[in-house]
Image: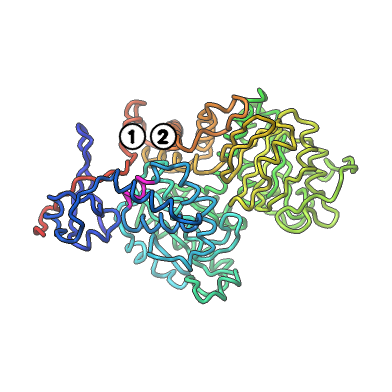
Amino acid sequence: MMDFPLVRDERTGEETLEVSLTGTALLRQPLFNKGSSFPEDERRDFGLLGLLPPHVNTLDSQAARRYREYLHQHTDLDKHILLRALQDRNEVLFYRLLSDHVAEMMPIIYTPTVGDACRHFSHIYRQARGLFIPYTHRHDLDAILDNRPFREVDVIVVTDGERILGLGDQGVDGMGIPVGKLSLYTLCGGIHPARTLPVLLDPGTDNADKLADPLYLGWRHGRVRGPEYDDFVESFVQAVRRKLPGVLLQWEDFAQANARRLLDRYRDRLCTFNDDIQGTGAVALAAVLAALRVTGGRLRDQCAVVVGAGSAGLGIAEQLAAAMARDGLPEAEARARFWLVDKPGLLLADMPGLLPGQQKFAQPPERVAGWRRDAPLPSPPVAGGEGKGEGGIGLLEVVANVRPTVLLGVSGQPGVFTQAVVREMARHVERPIILPLSNPTSRAEAAPADLIAWTDGRALVATGSPFPDVTWRGRTFRIGQCNNSYVFPGVGLGVIASRARRVSDEMFFRAAETLSASAADGTAPGGSLFPPLEEVRQVSRRIALAVGAEAMRQGLAPPLSPEEWQRRVDATMWTPRYPRFKRRPGEPAA
């Protein structure tokens, strides 16, 4: 475990790093390695003479060389592997390259390509990154955390690999998600990479293909569940509190049965949040708020059908319902405006086996007793099965009777938003808000081009994965990406910079408000509901300022003046550039 003593000159902005490594050990540490950009004096002082080609490169020329190599890769997975290999060699260059090509490379290092990378993780594994914690080492948690690469950690992203994107149980191969998320914390939010820590809890996997794969790198055992699983997670949390008190811990891609209850259990004991629940809810709320600026409607007047009642769907419903209540609607009435559709069809209060979060939004059976039944049926499948259980109510029937203004998809089932469903919605709404949010791209509920055509160009569309612009009847429609990467890096930056003790729902509401206001061309014909990805770092800064200010207002962070707070945020944000090196005091010359 190392320190990272980076000192910045406030007057000149120059950064200096005290380094104890020399020679090949220095070249093998990705956060210290400058490769061919080591200047002559550092090559001599740190024992690098003869270990590098003689010409001293610049970071600009290194980035240009790597981009040429990137363009020669044949598949997105090949590009992902190339970029991860670069990260394992030289992190400054990795982030500089990403910064130069944000919109092009974000889909490669995260969604949708990270889904492929997770499916093949054990096959493309190159080098250790982060901490792997199998159930068999549950008594070694302090020692494992002591093995973290750097002493000071600001943020941990942890998963147990059970619900990776729309792919399901990937076991230890789900480590690609924490690694990818933390890359976005740095790229978009400016969190220094030395202060991030990806963690994979490995309680086994129920994925038979993984267990049968001779190359699978995880614990070869069925998933531990029940009290044993809860004790495992509790031991991890206790170890984090001992070793890294005050760290921000983000839960990522936990199964529906665990995600909400773990968040509820720990949100008052840790500085923590669940991005699948709160981040997804905030970015969806931002999309709806941006769309309402186009339609001129009020949030309290909307009615939403949410397809997929897992962690993401419930998080979206909760965030939107809370925002409606802020807009003056009684809480019970706000919840009644949400119609959730999952495997058994429309969730009704008398259905057995509903989870507590689903029960909050399940509709009373009497509300559907008088529904007309002349809508063409059956509905398309939703999250598996036929879209409705025995006697259940399918999506098309729900849309025909409810006449929603908002249709959201987090089902992981491609094609759920059929032409019949979309046309039925568009019959009753002048500007339908349609958000197929499932990742990766292959799991999207509909393609934007179809949604635009089926609504005669009237739909307001944003998607979870990147899609190209749509041209329809001579008009161009920019398709915004309703992706959590617009929210969680800014939230994390605001929490870390403000030194907030907890993460509140109000902080996510402020993030959503700020993001929706950042879509400058959202009200233009065919404009996007989200700002360009190239602006994501500036958006993250604005979100951080709003989130930290809210934390101070709630008494969750020490108070600062607005001027001090802005200086703190700017000082926290790291930019990928090579610092000057100097030898750590007391270290002998190379």
Q: Of helix, strand and loop, which mostly describes the magenta segment? A: helix
Q: Position of residue 92 (x, y in %)?
A: 31, 49
Q: Position of residue 377 (x, y in %)?
A: 85, 48
What's the residue at 11%, 54% (across, down)?
Answer: 45
**Mark-to-mark CA distance, 2 and 1:** 8 Å
From the viewer's perspective, is 456 left or right of 573?
A: right
Under circle 2, the secondary element is helix
Residue 541: give its label. Answer: 2
Q: Which stretch is magenta? A: 91-97
Q: Is residue 94 magenta?
A: yes
What's the residue at 67%, 40% (across, down)?
Answer: 449
Instruction: Identify which amino acid the numbered label 1 is placed on.
Output: Asp
Q: Position of residue 105 (x, y in %)?
A: 46, 47
The image quadrant where one finds the C terminus is bottom left
N-terminal of the pair, mark 2 or mark 1, is 2
Q: Which is more toward the observer, 406 or 417?
A: 417
Few, some or many residues within 10 Å of mark 1 (<14, 14–19, 20+): some
Number of numbered tags placed on the structure image: 2
- Mark 1 = which residue? 570
Few, some or many residues within 10 Å of mark 2 (<14, 14–19, 20+): many
Q: Which is more toward the observer, 296 or 267?
A: 296
From the viewer's perspective, is 389 left or right of 199?
A: right
Q: Quadrant of residue 54?
A: bottom left
Label 2 close to label 1 by CB (< 8 Å): yes
